[in-house]
Structures are given as structure tokens and as C-alpha cells.
Image (cartoon, rainbow, N blue to C red):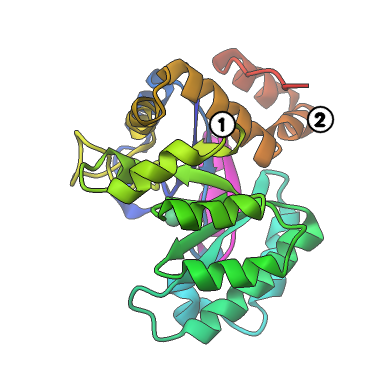
């Protein structure tokens, strides 16, 4: 079974001591690719160092909505755009989006979100969208960027909201939240997303799935998300794995990343190919 964890933060100090062991466990669980989300561009060099070590890690660059108050400045958009073009391992812009849960800087978040959507559009990269207590506004902002594709990450919205974003062509990524008993409305959302728009993620170190709830999360545990999604959709876990892995390869254009790796680093590509058995392109 091959899985892609489409949202990790393994640069966080939570993994300072044992990232090699964490990696061994994600390999054992069949996680063949990870998309490393970015909270602020200041983290980018550490993320690059992790990707140097583990070639299955692809990168995103952006400013998280909750970090806009501290980190969004006049030149942030240019900085993100430059970093995105500086490394062929960058496969997405984000995470960006809106988090109105406790925010007092809604205007600033919207501005930062719009800038990052424009970069995604210019560079033809997908966006990773964080959306908390802000579905309506997120939808309104996104609507103005019809050419931008992306993913609603760590999705917890109800079926009506899910339909809005599906209507805009977005992918929907489910996390450990769907393994929680009380998450009834997102369980309903799990059932209505078309197979070709489904993704899975851990959002680690946060939101460890049941039966590890409350502990530190890690990429290997994305298997519990796949398992629960299969139950909710009344299908088999291997089928969820195959669908979500193919979708991740398509959205983040990981097929072409392989070509980049082969062109620039034949030895790395060979090493990677030995360890990973890639799913083949659908076409
Ligand atoms: Ni995140």
C-alpha cells in the first residue's frame, strides 16, 4: 500500500530528537511522498535541509494565516515567489488561507491570501488552503481566482461548504479529525467528495488520529486516516490508498518532479527509485 501524506510540519522541534526513527516508521507504513507545508518563509532553509536528507519530501512555501500578524510584510509576496522559483522541489504555495477562529487581523489575512493566490496563478502551482471558521470568506476570495487549483487542507467543513469548494475545482484533504467520534459533519463530507478529488494528510505534529489521539502525530499515522475514510465511504483501504496517492501525484505534479530529479541528480533519483515503487501516471 502506497500513501502520500499531503501535509506535514516535520521541521517543528517536536521531531528534533528522532526524525530518522519517524522516517523509518513512515517507510514501513508505505508513505512514499510527503508534502511539507510552510508556516513562514523563515522556515524554508530548514525544510530544504530535511528534503536533502529525505528525497521523498516535496516542499511548499507561504505564510500561514495565523502568522500573518507577525510575518506578513510589504515584500513577503516577492520573497515567497522568489523562494518558490529557487528550488525545483517546491510543488505548492502555502499554507495560506483564512483562520477567523480568534483572529483580530482578518483584513491582513485576506490581503496575504490574495497575494499568495496571485503567486500560485503566476507560477502555475497549486495552493494549500487553511480554512477555519472562515468558509464563506475563503470561498468569496477564491472565486476571484478561477484558474487556481489547490487543496482544502485538514478539512472539517460540513457538506454544504464542501460542495462550494468542490464547485471551484478544489481537492479536499482529510486528516485525523475524521477518526474522532464526534466529528459528525465532516463524516458526512467524507461521503460526498468524488474519488478523484480526495486527499489524506496528518497535519503532524497536530491532530493525531484515534487511537493515538492526544499524542504527537507523525506521517506513519496517515494510515489511520485512510482506514477511517475507507469505512466512511464503504470501500477498501487499498482503494483509498491508490486513489489518494494518484490524486496527490496529479495535483502536486509529482510525476514531473521525478523528471527533475533524474535530470539534476541521477544518483539521488536512482536511490529514491530503489526505495519507492512509484504509481504510474493514469494516462
Ligand atoms: Ni499546517
User: Which one is earlier in the sequence, the residue at label 1 or at label 2?
Assistant: 1
Relative to 277, say whether 129 is above or below: below
Tell me residue 111's x, y (percent): 61, 80
User: 16 or 80: nearer the eye?
Assistant: 80
- Where disc 1 sits, the SS reads helix
User: Of the residues tagged 1 and 2, which is closer to the observer?
Assistant: 1
* Observer-nearest of 150 and 41: 150
Query: Label 1 vs label 2: CA separation?
Result: 32 Å
- Looking at the image, which residue is at 28% across and 38% down? 179
Question: Residue at coordinates 47% horizontally, 63% vertically from top-left?
Answer: 131
Packing grade of label 2 (10 A; few <14, some 14-19, many >=20) is few
- Judged from this view, the residue extending furthest toward the front is 160
Q: Position of residue 24 (x, y in %)?
A: 38, 24
Does the segment drawn in magenta span residue 57? yes
Q: Residue at x 42, y 50 (%)?
A: 154
Please report the bounds of the magenta region as a residue range: 43-64
The residue at which mark 2 appears reads as 263
- Left-right relation of 137 to 211: right
Drawn side of residue 151 relative to residue 30, left or right: right
Q: Quadrant of ligand 1?
A: bottom left
Residue 120 is situated, as x and y percent measured from the top left of the image, at 72, 60
Q: Is residue 212 magenta?
A: no
Q: Is residue 263 above or below residue 7?
A: above
Residue 154 visible in the snapshot = yes
> Residue at point 38% right, 80% down?
103
| Helix, strand or loop status at disc 2 | helix
Image quadrant in which the C terminus is located: top right
Residue 147 in picture, x, y percent from top left = 77, 57
Q: Which residue is mark 1?
A: 195
Image label count = 2
Amino acid at each position: 500500500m502506497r500513501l502520500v501524506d499531503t501535509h506535514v510540519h516535520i521541521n517543528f522541534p517536536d521531531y528534533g530528537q528522532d526524525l530518522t526513527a519517524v522516517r523509518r516508521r513512515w517507510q514501513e507504513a508505505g508513505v512514499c511522498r510527503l508534502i511539507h507545508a510552510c508556516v513562514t518563509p523563515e522556515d524554508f532553509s530548514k525544510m530544504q535541509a530535511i528534503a536533502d536528507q529525505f528525497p521523498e519530501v516535496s516542499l511548499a512555501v507561504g505564510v500561514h494565516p495565523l502568522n500573518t500578524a507577525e510575518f506578513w510584510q510589504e515584500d513577503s509576496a516577492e520573497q515567497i515567489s522568489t523562494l518558490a522559483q529557487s528550488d525545483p522541489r517546491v510543488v505548492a504555495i502555502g499554507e495560506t488561507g483564512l483562520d477567523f477562529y480568534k483572529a483580530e487581523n482578518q483584513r491582513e489575512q485576506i490581503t496575504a491570501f490574495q497575494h499568495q493566490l496571485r503567486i500560485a496563478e503566476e507560477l502555475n502551482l497549486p495552493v494549500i488552503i487553511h480554512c477555519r471558521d472562515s468558509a464563506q470568506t475563503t470561498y468569496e476570495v477564491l472565486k476571484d481566482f478561477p484558474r487556481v487549483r489547490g487543496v482544502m487542507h485538514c478539512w472539517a467543513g460540513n457538506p454544504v461548504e464542501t460542495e462550494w469548494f468542490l464547485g471551484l475545482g478544489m481537492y479536499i484533504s482529510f486528516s485525523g479529525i475524521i477518526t474522532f467520534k464526534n466529528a459528525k459533519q465532516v463524516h458526512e463530507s467524507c461521503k460526498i467528495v468524488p474519488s478523484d478529488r480526495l486527499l489524506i494528510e496528518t497535519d503532524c505534529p497536530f491532530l493525531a488520529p484515534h487511537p493515538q489521539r492526544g499524542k504527537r502525530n507523525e506521517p506513519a499515522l496517515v494510515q489511520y486516516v485512510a482506514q477511517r475514510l475507507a469505512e466512511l465511504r464503504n470501500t477498501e483501504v487499498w482503494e483509498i490508498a491508490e486513489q489518494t496517492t494518484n490524486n496527490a501525484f496529479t495535483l502536486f505534479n509529482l510525476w514531473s518532479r521525478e523528471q527533475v530529479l533524474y535530470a539534476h541528480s541521477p544518483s539521488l533519483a536512482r536511490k529514491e527509485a530503489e526505495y519507492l515503487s512509484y504509481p504510474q501516471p493514469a494516462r
